[in-house]
Image (cartoon, rainbow, N blue to C red):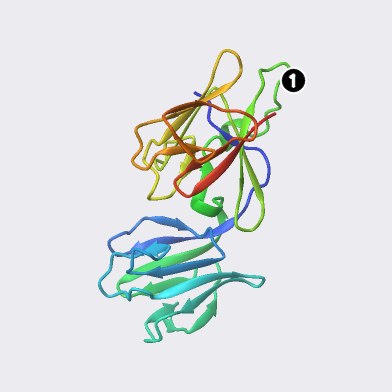
Amino acid sequence: MERGEIVQEQISTAYLRVEQGSQAGKRIELWKEHTTIGRSRNCDIFLEDVTVHRKQASILYTHAGYVLRDDHGSGDSLVNGRVVQEQLLHDGDQLLFGNTRLTFYSHDATRPFQQISSRGKESHRGKVRDPNASTIGRLNFTNTRGGLQSFELRSEVTIGRSRDCSIFLEDLAVSRLHAIIRQLPDETYELTDQDSATGTFVNGQPISRCRLKEGDIVQIGASRLTFRKM
């Protein structure tokens, strides 16, 4: 199976790596202009740490870079061991909230809004598409910064919350294997829901199986993608 490929804009963002705490080793990419951090499950970054406030802090994307802002006011948001109220972050900065320590990295992340990513980029890099090859479809997605992401569809593309999927959606409303898109012999594409918990929708209607047409809007979790033919 060949996997989807990002064929247009590559958005580069920052990420956090949890170094200490119950989620040690986890990588959390910053895909919004305003990312909330805390013990509340309503936060963008949920820290399972009883010493963290429900609404602890935010990371803001500004023209100067990423800024950490303390939202609780208790003086327990630290950067490199120093209490901060608002701090411009630099690559390698150490953040501490309660007993959870994280490292900020300002490069080498690629996931836009809802953390959609394609896992086929490396396998197709540098390859020129055969002009005699069959018609290729794509899924277009507009992220919060207004940039267009385009995922090229191959013979079979899996979509879900598992990192093994061709298109990875880091969204708790998405099942690990949520849906599959397959190219049919007549060069059309068929979308099939994989008994997902929250359903797959095309143009606002729930589907179990659907042949995609030009301009169809596919919704999986909070992500809306537009089907196009190349």
Residue at the limit of the structure toward the front, as seen here? 205
Where is residue 42? Give x, y as percent: 37, 64
Name the residue carrying label 1.
131
Which residue appears at 49% of the width and 78% of the height? 69
Quarter of the view holding residue 103: bottom left
Residue at the limit of the structure toward the bottom, as seen here? 74
Q: Quadrant of the C terminus?
A: top right
* Residue 111 vertical position relative to residue 83 in the rendered view, above or below: above
Where is residue 173? Give x, y as percent: 39, 48
Quarter of the view holding residue 72: bottom left
Residue type at mark 1? Pro
The foreground one among 83 and 62 is 62
Helix, strand or loop for disc 1: loop
Callout 1 crowding tier (Cα within 10 Å): few <14, some 14–19, many ≥20: few
The foreground one among 19 and 77 is 77
Which residue appears at 57% of the width and 31% of the height? 123
Residue at the limit of the structure toward the top, as seen here? 185
Where is residue 160? Give x, y as percent: 42, 39
The foreground one among 142 and 18 is 142
For residue 133, side relative to residue 71 (left or right): right
Residue at the limit of the structure toward the right, as seen here? 131
